[in-house]
Image (cartoon, rainbow, N blue to C red):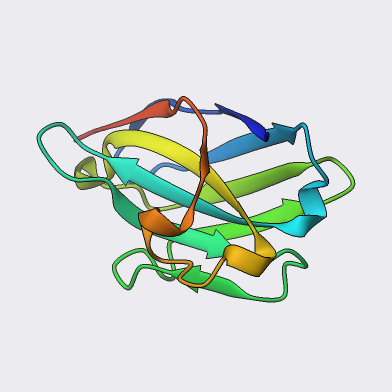
Amino acid sequence: QVLLVESGGGLVQAGGSLTLSCAASGRTFSNYGMGWFRQAPGKEREFVAAISWSGGGTYYADSRKGRFTITRDNAKNTVYLQMNSLKPEDTAVYYCAAQQTTSWVSPRSRYSYNYWGQGTQVTVSS
């Protein structure tokens, strides 16, 4: 079992920045591929970014590439999502997800992840 706890969400003005953190516990963190997803009210959960166990492979949704950066620190069992130039349409609950590397076949698909955090709210005002 992997326990994921997100933090760092909040209210920010358009054009601002936030860094989300996801702390993992319970298993060897470096054995897991990690992802960030988000869900706005009335919409499906959508892919934001993902990172391989080593950090050597990163994946982004096209609309977020260039504004968002995913990184991880295996020594701290933590994955980060740096978000810049935020827009009101980035408003959503952001979720961290994890899956064992051997089963992490589609990093962009929410169905590739077995473990999820409780989410952290990000609100971008115009």
Question: Up-down: is 27 above or below 11?
Answer: below
Q: Residue 55: where, in percent of width, then height? A: 72, 67
Q: Identify the residue at horizontal 72%, vertical 54% (top origin).
A: 72
Dividing the image into 4 quarters, which one contains the N terminus?
Answer: top right
Residue 11 in the image, given as x and y percentages of width and height: 37, 24
Relative vertical location of residue 51 with respect to residue 80 in this rendering, above or below: below
Residue at the outermost left position: 42
Depth check: give the residue in front, 52 or 90: 52
Q: In this view, does 110 lie to the left or right of 58?
A: left
User: How many numbered marks does the figure carry?
Assistant: 0
* Residue 103 lies in quadrant: bottom right
Picture quarter with the C terminus: top left
Q: Which residue is drawn at 47% across and 25% down?
A: 118
* Position of residue 108 in the picture relative to residue 57 (left or right): left
| 123 sits left or right of 48 in the view | left
Percent x, y for residue 50? 53, 62
Q: In this view, does 5 lie to the left or right of 89?
A: right
Residue at image location 40% in from the left, 37% down from the top:
94
Front-lying residue, 87 or 109: 109
Please tell me in which quadrant of the rendered image residue 100 appears. Answer: bottom right
Residue 108, how many percent across, how many down?
A: 41, 66
Q: In this view, does 19 lie above or below 4?
A: below
Q: Residue at x 49, y 52 (%)?
A: 113
Seen from the viewer's position, the closer of residues 93 and 9 is 93
Which residue is outermost to the right? 75
Vertical arrangement, residue 41 with respect to residue 45, above or below: above
